[in-house]
Structures are given as structure tokens and as C-alpha cells.
Amino acid sequence: MLRTYGDTDFITGMRAIAATMVVIIHTGAFADLGMLGQTINSAGKYGVDIFFVISGFTIAKTFGEASSYGSYLTRRIIRIAPIYWFVTSVAFMMYLSGVLPASDWMQELGSQPDMYNYVMHLSMLSFLDYTIANSILGVEWSIPIEVFWYICLPLVIHFGRSIRAVFIPIVVLAILTAILTYASKKLVGTSLPVKWSPIAYGHLFFIGVLSFHLRAKYLVSTSPKVGLWIVGAVALFVASLVLKIDGRGEICALAAAILIVCVAPGRSAWLTKVLTNRIMLFLGSISYSIYLLHTLVVHTLREVWGGFDSSIVHFLVVYGVTILLATATYFLIERPTNSFGKRLAYIMKERRA
């Protein structure tokens, strides 16, 4: 069941780390360990930044390998949508039936588990209304953003294949995000309309594309400096976890991008052994299901079990239950639909031929 991608298997291990980081923040795993533990907890949200950088790399790679834009997009959408629709539908029914009370974001932003909310989620347009964008699962705000860049990013890649052509949008989107965030706070009193929009994270997808181009350039390099870059990236990642400084998300994303560029078979074996051991590959293979399911597990356990005496125990219980459920959904939904997407893309390729 382990996904293998040849010389980029380590990225699957990075996905495992990113998913675990998100579970950490939503369970307060290290809250009992004082300021350091709370700092590590708060860094968990940057697991999404790592996912977005990896997605940018994956988009560039799969689009370059696809026979057409249609076959590429078919595989991408079928890869992400079915399990998202399933978990969202389960959570929605749990809210409607009263099994779960209104989520924290529903209560804070005054939204309801109604048909408007549900349809906006299924259509991947929920980012257009910040009051519902994160109301069902508590992590789903990122999925329509992924789909948006699945659709739009290849167009930029097609017309701008140079490193410079990719670097310019990174700068433009970062500046645009800052301007829109300021305007949003002034107009509606919150940055959420921008925070949960594709614009705010576009630069991370472009960083992923940039890492794709640079990896092709430096993959065969024998310079010892490449090893130093890898050590530096790991140091940056650790710093983003333990130091409460501004720009931690960008530091974490930069570290992920450097690793994507530099890590290769036979290079920095100390790191690749960690990222490609069977446990990491297993967790990385089911990381998408872990990401979608863990908050539903948190909310359900809160209703059934109540509180936990230890934050670490809370994390371990949630993580363990989530892994069991994610394994099931991977076998029953993710893997079959992924195979169907590949077959459909192949059929489209054959018809073009």
C-alpha cells in the first residue's frame, strides 16, 4: 500500500511530517510542556504550508508528464475530491442529526450546517464565503485552494517555464496578500476572507514550482555545498518549530523547498533513511486522509469521552484512531479512486493519439 515515487520517495515522508504537525496543533500535544511545548504546538499549522509547497512541485511534475491539460486535471481532481466529499458528507450528517454540536467556527462566524454550506463545500467554492469556508471539518479551507491552483497553476507553467517567470508571481502574490489582508481588516474587521483564499497561499505553490525547476538543475550536482544546503534546511525547519519568531510559516516552506531541490539518492543518507523508512512512507501514503479525518475524531471524542488529563495522551489517542480510520478510507476510497483517475487519464491519452 506504500506509495513509491523513485528518487522523490522522501517527499512522502515530508507529507507524513506535515500531517502530524496539523494533528499536533489541533490536539495541543505538547501543551503540558510549558512555553516550548506551546511554541511547538502553534507551529503545527505550518504543516499546511509544507503541503502547499509539495503540491506546487507535484503540479509542475504531473503537468509536465501529462499528455494534455484535461488528463492532468482529471487525475488531480479525482485524486483529491472523492475522499474530501465523503468525509465532508459524514461530518455534515453528524451535525444535522445532532450527533455533533455546531463547530467552533460555525459558532464564531454564525454559519449553519445547511444546504448552502454543503453545496459550497462540494463545489469547492467555499473559499468565496469566509463564514462557511472552515465550518464543517475545521481544516477543509485548504482543499478548494488546492483545487484552484490545480486549475490555474499549469497555465502559468505553460507560458512561463523559466525560473524568473516563476519567481515574479511569488513576489507579486506575497505583496498582494499583504495589501488585501490590510484592506480586509479595515473593511470587515478580520483577515479571514484573505487568509482562507487562494491568493494568500499562491506564493507557496509557486515556490513548489520553483523547487521543481531547481531540482532538475541540481539533481546531478556533486558539489559538497548541496549537503550543506540540506543541513541548513533541516536547521531552518527545527528553528521554525521551537522559536516563536515572525515568518515561521515562510521559513518552514523555504526549508521544505530546499529539501525538495537537494535531497537525492546517495546524498545525505542520514536524512533519506528517516524520511523513507516504512513507517514514514505508510503515514505519508495516508496523510491526506489523516489531514481530513483528525478534526472529526477530535470533535467526536470530545462529545463521547470528554476531556483528557494529559495533552500528550489526547494527541496519541486522536492520532491512533485517525490512523486506523485513514487506513480504512485509503483502501476503500483513496486507492480505488486514484486507480480510476489513472485509467481515465490513460483513456483520454489514447483518444488524443
Image: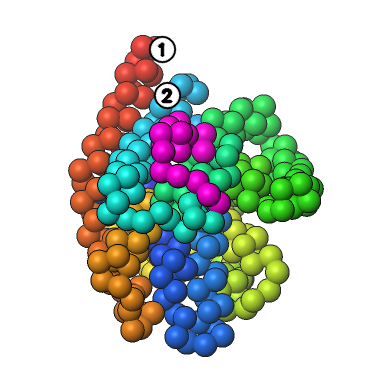
User: Do the numbered discs 2 and 1 sit on residues whose CB atoms are within 8 Å?
Assistant: yes
- The residue type indicated by label 1 comes to Arg
Residue at position x 78%, y 51% in the image: 186
Closer to us: 346 or 331: 331
Q: How many marks?
A: 2
- Residue 210: x percent and y percent? 63, 46
The answer to whether 267 appears left or right of 278 in the picture is right
- Whichever of labels 2 and 1 marks the residue nearer the N terminus, that label is 2
Q: Residues within 10 Å of mark 2 (few under 14, many from 20)?
A: many
Whether 119 is among the magenta residues is yes
The answer to whether 162 appears left or right of 119 in the picture is right
Q: Quadrant location of the C terminus?
A: top left
In the image, the segment drawn in magenta is 109-126
- The residue type indicated by label 2 comes to Ser
Residue, disc 1? 352
- Residue 151: x percent and y percent? 54, 30
Mark 2, secondary structure of its residue: helix
- Residue 232: x percent and y percent? 61, 71
